[in-house]
Amino acid sequence: MNNVAKDMLTKIRQCEIRFHGRGGQGAMTAAKIVAQAAYLQGYQGVTATPSFGAERRGAPVSASVRISREPVKIVSRVDEPDVVIVLDHTLLRRPEVIGGLKSSGWLVVNSWQHPRELDINNGFNIATADATRVAQELGLVVAGLTVVNTAILGAFVRATELLERKTVETVMKRLFSDRATENIAAFTKTYEITEVLTVN
């Protein structure tokens, strides 16, 4: 476990995560996978909720996840996340995407660029991986839209180490019974190619 991940687990009893993507990319499904994996790992409090209602294809959407060692009673949108996961790098142009992200928090972005090339100097730890390319290579495309949710989770797990790979894969096997192999492969490949830049 890296020092940043250890710090996060030591300092906070609850981790708040916010996903930003576009309708059809699977942001809400990714949030559910994280929540279910956290529950399997023994977190007592777990919530996963959409922030802007039902997804519309291509429109910006977000989802919030809270995982905690104790029961969680809050199910509202996460406003001050410890982690922000961005499924479409073009959304970084919108100030609300990284708005509220805590200092020394994690910004995980679906991008072919190295974290330094994003030119974001806000005191965040940054991880990037080309989840789109990985998903396309594995045929994770629905009606012309690349579904990057399982791929970007590889970058999230690699960077934060909040969840175990095997646990996430177990959830994917249950959720994607017909396409589990491709989704787990996308998760694994992205985990392997993730570039990380820490502030500590």
Image (cartoon, rainbow, N blue to C red):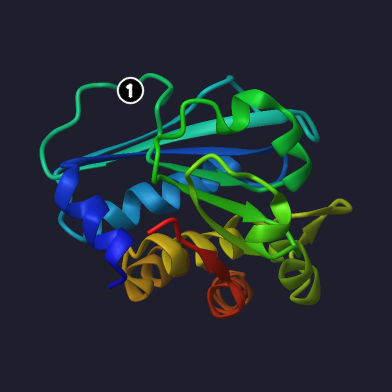
Can I make out residue 75 in this image? yes
Q: Position of residue 99 (x, y in %)?
A: 54, 26
Can I make out residue 176 in this image? no
Most foreground residue, 17 or 126:
126
Q: Quadrant of the N terminus?
A: bottom left
Image side of residue 63 versus residue 102, left or right:
right
Image side of residue 51 versus residue 168, left or right:
right
Graded by Cα atoms within 10 Å as few (under 14), some (14 to 19) or many (20 or more), the crowding at tag 1 reads: some
Secondary structure state at the residue bearing disc 1: loop
Q: Quadrant of the C terminus?
A: bottom left
Dot 1 amino acid type: Val
Most foreground residue, 45 or 139:
45
Q: Which residue is mark 1?
A: 75
* Residue 78, quarter of the rendered image: top left
Q: Position of residue 147 (x, y in %)?
A: 71, 55
> For the point 74% across and 65% down, which residue is it?
140
Q: Position of residue 61 (x, y in %)?
A: 65, 30
Q: Position of residue 108 (x, y in %)?
A: 55, 53
Q: In the displayed image of the protein, which residue is found farthest to the left?
A: 70
* Residue 132, quarter of the rendered image: bottom right
> For the point 39% across and 63% down, which residue is it?
171
Say if 196 sits above or below 124 in the image: below
> For the point 78% across and 69% down, which residue is it?
133
